[in-house]
Image: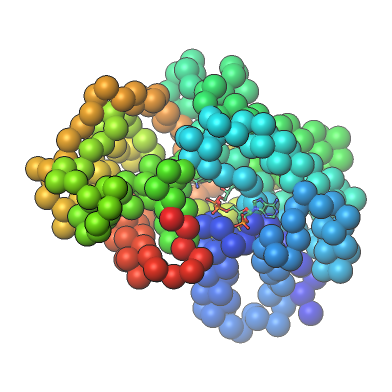
Amino acid sequence: MSKFNVLITGSSGMVGQSLQLYVKRYNLHHKNTIDSSPNYYFLTREDCDLTNKAKLREIFKKLKVTFVVHLAAKVGGLYMNMKHNVEMFMENMKINMNVIELCHEFNVNRGVFCLSSCIFPPEPKSFPMKEEYICDSPPHPSNEGYAYSKRMLYIMCKHYNQQYGRDYICVSPVNLYGAYDNFDINNSHVIPGIIHKMYLTKYQEGEYKKDTYEVLGTGKAQRQFLFAMDFACIIFKILWNKDIDKKNMLINICSDKEYTIKQVVQLIAFNLDYDIHNIVYNNKYSDGCIKKTVSNKLFRKFFPDHKFIPLEDGLDATISWFEKNYNKPRFRK
Ligand code: NAP
């Protein structure tokens, strides 16, 4: 029997689903050691609302949790963040405090906790942003609630590590995309939003049925992207890499590549077979930050050979999944 019981929160989400698939594949390829392999418990909101500490305590107790991967968060696009700063802050604070307090109560020594590159200062002292810039100046006002709750998660991990000798590692990924993403037309991140709107423009009747596909902004802003399955694989590697401990407790996760929004729009158009001559850029809308580049130097120190899934391949997989699942009940649109 394994001595490791790993609890994963947020398992019904995009990253949680990717991690489940990754673990299944990993176990298939490592059949010979399966008897001693760790037990993974993928927790969803149906099992426990993480704002309910008493219920979560029962779960920690029952499962004899030894390690935690904390993915759960109230996540939203720009609109959700701007309109619901209170909920984004309060709910994420409650979830994070409950998880980390119970980790400590049950003597969980190691965990991976998920932050986000969008919580970094919008005007940093230099690019690419190193991990230590995280709290240099306030986050962008549009997502203050979410960003401060994530920064507080980082502070909590840091102090549990310093005061109690834990190894609570924070990972900070750039924009994620993939299967099981939220494709809600009014409240999604950039890639799922473009895919869904362009798909509707091309194929469907209704509000988005137009001859042209309009991009809000000039398309010149640059962004880094990470395929959710890539992130799942990296979380797994970090969880089991003993060289990564409290001394390197915050790690940015990204490849070396950066794309303009225009490049992303065109890649999606090629994939959906949408005529790029029908794409217009409306420069009356803001581009947001023109650049948000974070550094992967620390990540590369530990994983010099990790090969990131190219954006083209990740988009292929995401769009195939999107088309296959569009009419399924749990699809978020
Ligand atoms: P997601 O698809 O929205 O998944 C979030 C998960 O958290 C869902 O399973 C959700 O359950 C769960 N959750 C939220 N509130 C909960 C609560 N009170 N109790 C129990 N479960 C709760 O998000 P994701 O994209 O996989 O994100 C995973 C992590 O990556 C998050 O920590 C996020 O902040 C971070 N991140 C995401 C991005 C991105 O571009 N998506 C970028 C950087 C960092 P329900 O489905 O039931 O709501």
- In the orientation shown, which residue stands out farthest toward the front? 206
Against 313, is 246 above or below?
above
> Quarter of the image containing the N terminus?
bottom right
The residue sitting at 24% across, 24% down in the picture is: 283
- In the orientation shown, which residue stands out farthest toward the left? 277
Q: Which picture quadrant has residue 91?
A: top right
| Observer able to see residue 63 | yes
Position of residue 236 in the picture relative to residue 228 (left or right) = right
- The residue closer to the viewer here, 139 or 256, is 139
| Spot occupied by residue 171 in the image (x, y as percentages of width and height) | 59, 44
The residue sitting at 31% across, 25% down in the picture is: 285
The residue sitting at 27% across, 22% down in the picture is: 284
Q: Which picture quadrant has residue 200?
A: bottom left
| Spot occupied by residue 8 in the image (x, y as percentages of width and height) | 68, 60
> Quarter of the image containing the C terminus?
bottom left
- The residue closer to the viewer here, 195 or 125, is 195
Against 286, is 263 above or below?
below
Against 134, is 103 above or below?
below
| Spot occupied by residue 157 in the image (x, y as percentages of width and height) | 74, 39
The residue sitting at 47% across, 35% down in the picture is: 78
Position of residue 266 in the picture relative to residue 119 (left or right) = left
| Spot occupied by residue 291 in the image (x, y as percentages of width and height) | 37, 26
| Observer able to see residue 308 | no
Q: Which picture quadrant has residue 24?
A: bottom right
